[in-house]
Amino acid sequence: MKAEDATIGAIRGLLSEKLLVEVDSPEADLLKAGILDSLALIQLLVHLEERFGVKIALDELEIEDLRSISSIAQMVEQQRAIQGAARVPRNTVLPVNR
């Protein structure tokens, strides 16, 4: 599984768990369909920052970055690469070697 596929799954989970929104396709236009409004977008950004350990600067965001789950995943992966954040999502149990 590619990192972006895992990110897509995690974003779908965030939308479902935190915003109570189900999205059928990662390519669905979340804005055009009215799934995300301005308040939901801000809530999603907060959850993305918490989950993936990245800081998303509002002044650098483009509306196209938030149009679909796939575009959100690409943006998150780019921010992780730029910021050097760990690729392991929060709340993931890691094995401990003793």
Image (cartoon, helix red, strand yellow):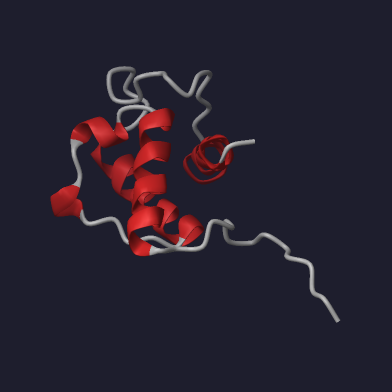
Q: Is residue 26 above or below residue 48?
A: above
Observer-nearest residue: 42 or 60?
60
Q: Residue at x 30, y 28 (%)?
A: 67
Q: Is residue 16 left or right of residue 29?
A: right
Q: Is residue 31 left or right of residue 88?
A: left
Observer-nearest residue: 56 or 23?
56
Q: Is residue 91 above or below residue 64?
A: below
Q: Residue at x 35, y 25 (%)?
A: 30
Q: Is residue 1 above or below residue 90?
A: above
* Residue 93 in picture, x, y percent from top left: 73, 63
* Residue 52 in picture, x, y percent from top left: 47, 56
Q: Is residue 55 above or below residue 67?
A: below
Q: Residue at x 43, y 31 (%)?
A: 69
Task: Pick the quarter of the image with the N terminus.
Answer: top right
Quadrant of the image occupied by residue 56: bottom left
* Residue 11 in picture, x, y percent from top left: 50, 40
* Residue 35 in picture, x, y percent from top left: 37, 26
Q: Is residue 42 left or right of residue 6?
A: left
